[in-house]
Image (cartoon, rainbow, N blue to C red):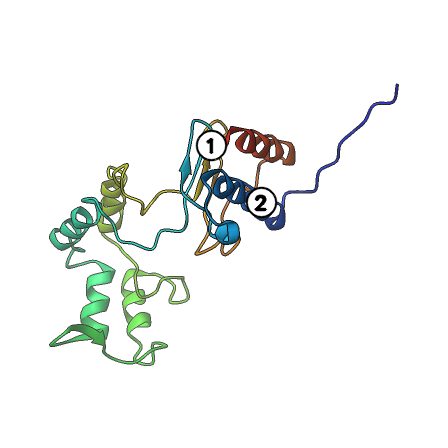
Amino acid sequence: MTDIKLLFPIVTDQLINQMMYAIAETILQYKGEPTDLYSYGTYYKNDIFEMRPFYWGDCTCDYEPTVAKWEKENDHDPTCYQTIFHEMHYKKDDYGFKEGHGFNDECGCVATVCAMFKISPDAPGSYVHCTCMHDINTANFLNTLSHSESCEVDKPNFKHYNSGIEINWYKYIGRDMEYPDDISTDVWINMFEKCMRSIK
């Protein structure tokens, strides 16, 4: 008897798109809803996976107010690159800060402040260097926070629980799609088959 070897295509956006399309369309058929909107995804959750469309709304938990409060109460040190650069380069008007000297550092503010801190003026982020602990403290603080379970802002558009695979897209499946690129084709196929069988 001759062994049969099945060959699947390499993992590409098109392969992931087709899987998500098929799962969304099957869910819509199961729910008895029109299937012509399958490309956006749909709301569904079971023990195997969850899917949701791109979320257009705002944060519905206390995450963003908590972050805003932190930012209001914690600023860069007076001696930080960020503070000195802003005071030199920007000016205040009735509505807050606005560009003071034009773009492309025609005024030389970037070069001047970079020289003060021995930073190359060609280094990325010349308008936002932080030489105090502000950025580190903020990152540490944000690591202690998360959106609530009911808040949709940070939830993936698709998640397979067993493998941990998460997929995100913008507006519709395939657009600016993000997914893990270090997973083999057979894992993707296996995940897809289990998801399709679980829709009931």
* Residue annotated with mark 1: 164
* Residue displayed at 47% across by 54% down: 172
Q: How many marks?
A: 2
Whole-angstrom CA distance, mark 2 to mark 1, is: 15 Å
Q: Residues within 10 Å of mark 2 (few under 14, many from 20)?
A: some
Relative vertical location of residue 143 with respect to residue 90 in this rendering, above or below: above
Front: mark 2 or 1: 2
* Residue displayed at 19% across by 63% down: 83
- Kindly state the secondary structure of the residue where label 1 is placed: loop
Q: Residues within 10 Å of mark 1 (few under 14, many from 20)?
A: few
Residue furthest to the front in view is: 32
Q: Give the camera-side residue of 31 and 196.
A: 31
Amino acid on which the number 2 mark rests in the picture: Ile
65 on left or right of 103: left
Q: Give the camera-side residue of 185 and 149.
A: 149
* Residue annotated with mark 2: 16
- Kindly state the secondary structure of the residue where label 2 is placed: helix
The answer to whether the residue labelled 2 contacts the one labelled 1, judged by CB atoms less than 8 Å apart, is no
Q: Give the camera-side residue of 199 and 193.
A: 199
Relative vertical location of residue 32 with respect to residue 160 in this rendering, above or below: below
**Quadrant hosting residue 22:** top right
- Asked if one can make out residue 173 in the rendered structure from this viewpoint, the answer is no
Amino acid on which the number 1 mark rests in the picture: Gly
* Residue displayed at 48% across by 43% down: 28
* Residue displayed at 26% across by 50% down: 135
The mark that comes first in sequence, 2 or 1, is: 2
Q: Position of residue 114 (x, y in %)?
A: 31, 65
Q: Position of residue 23 (x, y in %)?
A: 53, 40
